[in-house]
Amino acid sequence: MSQPQDTDQITDDFQLPGVPDAFQRLWTPHRRAYVSGGQQDYDEHTCPFCAAPTRKDEDSLIVHRGEHAFVVLNLYPYNPGHVLVCPYRHIADYDEATEQETAEIARFTQIIMGVLREQSHAAGFNIGMNQGKIGGAGIAAHLHQHIVPRWSGDTNFLPIVAGTKTVTQTLAEIRELLAGAWPADDDD
């Protein structure tokens, strides 16, 4: 089969399975583990956010631990430095969090924003919580807040067209950088 010659032909043929696509795809096989798992129902015994604090920080990619919550790198980041702030308790919704958990989640969010500005020169942030499966939470059973650093021009053709981001450091390197930059006067 011959390769399409013009843009209209590429777009039309791209829709057909098995037809060469003139390199219109950027493959990210590492995301298969996340995508193939789908949204699962987790309990305290199977939840990755409950398991993370039981291991060494380096193994779980934990940046910082507090009394009620911890900061961990996202295994499937939208941008380099994408972290999650999670309470230790296995709760699903924000309105289930205690006053102490809510305060620590807020404080850690503020601190990691400063750390990310200092270490990566982030110019902005997306911060939010997806509540429930229908709300888009990948792990709906355990509350977690996303902090995604943003930079001017970080929305280029890759995320828009290919739905792909490039991360230039390993997660272990990013964890070490952020953990090392956590303010010493905030150790709990």
Image: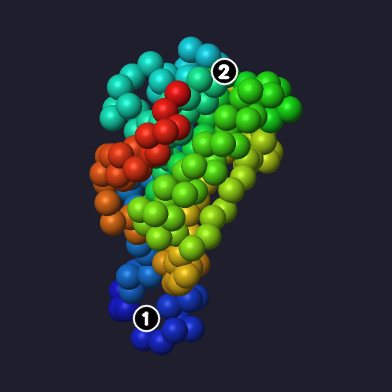
In the picture provided, is 122 more to the left or to the right than 43? left
Query: On the image, numbered disc 2 is attached to which residue?
Result: 89
Numbered badge on residue 4 = 1
Residue 172 sits in quarter = top left
Q: Nearer the viewer, residue 18 or 129?
A: 129
Give x and y (percent) for residue 121: 40, 60
Looking at marks 2 and 1 on the same chain, the residue that comes earlier in the sequence is marked by 1
Toward the bottom, the furthest residue is 6
Q: Is residue 76 above or below residue 64?
A: below
Q: Can residue 8 be seen by looking at this rendering? A: yes
Give x and y (percent) for residue 70: 47, 28
Give x and y (percent) for residue 165: 40, 58
The residue tagged with tag 2: helix, strand or loop? loop
Q: Quadrant of the N terminus?
A: bottom left
Q: Can residue 38 be seen by looking at this rendering? A: no
Numbered badge on residue 176 = none
Residue 9 sits in quarter = bottom left
